[in-house]
Image: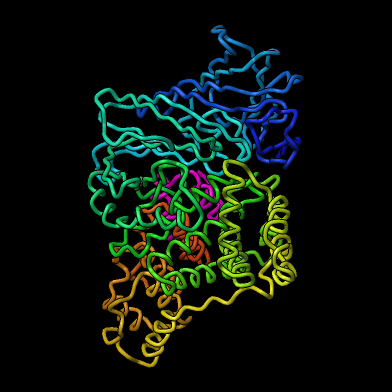
Amino acid sequence: MIFYKKFKIIFTLIMTPLSSIPALAIDPHSFAIPAEAVVQKLYLNINVDFGKKTINGKAQWTIKKSESAKEIHFDTKNILIEKVTIDEIGNPWKFAWGKEDAILGHDLIIPLKNNTTVVTIFYSTSPDAAACQWLDQQQTAGKKLPFLFTQCQAILGRTLFPCQDSPGIRFTYEADVKVPVEMIALMSAENPIEKNRTGQYHFRMTNPIPSYLMALAVGDIQYQSIGERTGVYAEPSMLEKSAYEFIDMQKMLENAEKLYGPYRWGRYDVLVLPPSFPFGGMENPMLTFATPTILAGDRSLVSLVSHELAHSWSGNLVTNANWNDFWLNEGFTVYFERRITESLYGKDFADMEAYLGMDDLKETLKEFEKTPNATCLKLKLDGQDPDDGMNSIAYEKGYALLLLIEKTIGRVALDAFLRKYFDSNAFQTMTTEQFLIYIEKNLFSKFPGAEKKVNIKEWVYKPGLPQNCPIIVSERFNDVNSQFQKWMNGLSPENLRTANWTTHEWLNFIDKLPTQVSMTRMTQLDSVFKFSSTGNAEVAEAWFLQSLIHNYTPAYIFMEKFLIEVGRRKFLMPLYKEMMKTKYGKELATKIYKQARPNYHFVARQSVDELLNWKN
């Protein structure tokens, strides 16, 4: 693999003169050189063509350049550049291609005049653009119209539009989007709440955002208000169910503001996507994209919404400067999420989520035993796809560090620090090194001995879990353990006390199953609790994993249906990994994946392709 090692300066205060901006970090995943020329505002005018599965139009960038800059660099990947113009000149302008890399794509270089302030790029996406998921009508809930959604994190924005695709570079934007008249378009911006007759929609985002937070969805979508500043979008057949599940969104928003200050994005809405969405959720500003797999019917999985809402502060407001600092986005967000959850549903509920999160972290640590440096909070992803670093290390190890700080200096002091952190660094970027300086000056210096007790640099720069990692305890899981022991001692499943269990209790119970369980006992559990046929995706995935481990073949037909319909990578990878451990399992995985693969987003396909060594 060819990797273009060119030093690019990522800076924080884009709106200040370039000459006064300090060099803060190197972004190994972008061709942009913002110290020379950087984007500030985007006007996007595009047409969404479902027939060709392309997006075409123009990206008009308002830029800022240094006096000596002769060119500007954009990130692109599999994009057709039709022509380039500069300033008010309508005639085609010259451009050149720089380095090309299998991961990073192609460096688009546009020469500049001394007084150039606008660069316009006319382009078309590829039908297989990695950021875009084109679904035919049979892949949607309504089965009537096709659907498009995008996913730009981490570095897929460059397949959707030519951009400076680094989280350290922020810009405002407006967009005009043309779609088929029977559909509605939505973006990570101010959105319409109903379809119009023209198929033309205008969008505006007045807060500066990085390219990975650009988002577009087009389809048969309706809207329902939840609260004064909150609401939900979904396909018509999913709208009522989604609105029921997210009834507490307005309360989440208000409780979040009580913790860490005002919500600065106007509205907070959620779009429930078709099941091929590869993640649980994506924190696109003003419009979180969410998987339908959180629609459990009992509101027990809506912490995903509180997680994406929390990103409105940690991630969207204060952003990791590059993907090596990913934990600054996710560790803070998990901590914030659980504080929101605790405020709404109680400490015992939040403790269950923290306990399950620690279990996930321990499993991830086992996976990286041969590459322990991958378990440091500060990552070294140079030469890799940054998506490789998006695992529970950043999320749960980052959370555990903040929990340790809370236990060391007290919750009140940590809350005050975090609120100041978000306020002081709003709409700016942050590196790990900057944060270490910031927390020493603004927190540890006020609590003698706290820094030594926490030993934050060990958490950040050394692998594994430090000895001072907090122990997570869940009282409600103690009750699950009591019922599990009764089952282990021979009590029939129907006699277990499970009436008030949530998804979390069921996950904890299923995960406790020992290595050896008879077919008879697996059948009894399934018969009583209907695990194989459950509509709860979290419980289903946990049960299917145990079914593979215990060779409980009656569940396989349900698992096959699940893997074909659901594209959430969190669920796919454990099941395919387990199947790959045996000869029969490999055959089963190949059979299922051949049918399921067209339904998966590029992000999910990329991971499963590598696991299965898939060749088209």
Tell me, yes or no, whether the highlighted magenta stretch contains residue 562.
no
Q: Where does the magenta region start and end?
A: 588-616
Question: On the rendered image, what quadrant is the N terminus found in?
Answer: top right
Residue 257 position (above or below residue 20)? below
Q: Say which residue appears at 28% left-offset and 62% top-offset.
A: 297
Magenta segment, prevailing SS (helix, strand or loop):
helix
Q: Quadrant of residue 7?
A: top right
**In the image, is 312 to the left or to the right of 329?**
left
Residue 351 position (above or below residue 611)? below
| Residue nearest the viewer, comparing 334 with 364 | 334
| Residue nearest the viewer, comparing 591 with 444 | 444
Q: Residue furthest bottom?
A: 489
**In the image, is 556 to the left or to the right of 455?**
left
Q: Say which residue appears at 39% left-offset and 45% top-offset.
A: 268
**In the image, is 390 to the left or to the right of 293?**
right
| Colour logic | rainbow
Tell me, yes or no, whether the highlighted magenta stretch contains residue 611.
yes
Q: Residue furthest front?
A: 446
Q: Where does residue 152 sit, x and y in percent of width and height?
A: 51, 40
Q: Say which residue appears at 36% left-offset and 35% top-offset.
A: 191
Q: Where does residue 35 sit, x and y in percent of width and height?
A: 72, 30
Q: Where does residue 167 sit, x and y in percent of width and height?
A: 60, 41
Residue 125 position (above or below residue 438)? above
Q: Quadrant of residue 590?
A: bottom left
| Residue nearest the viewer, comparing 591 with 307 | 307
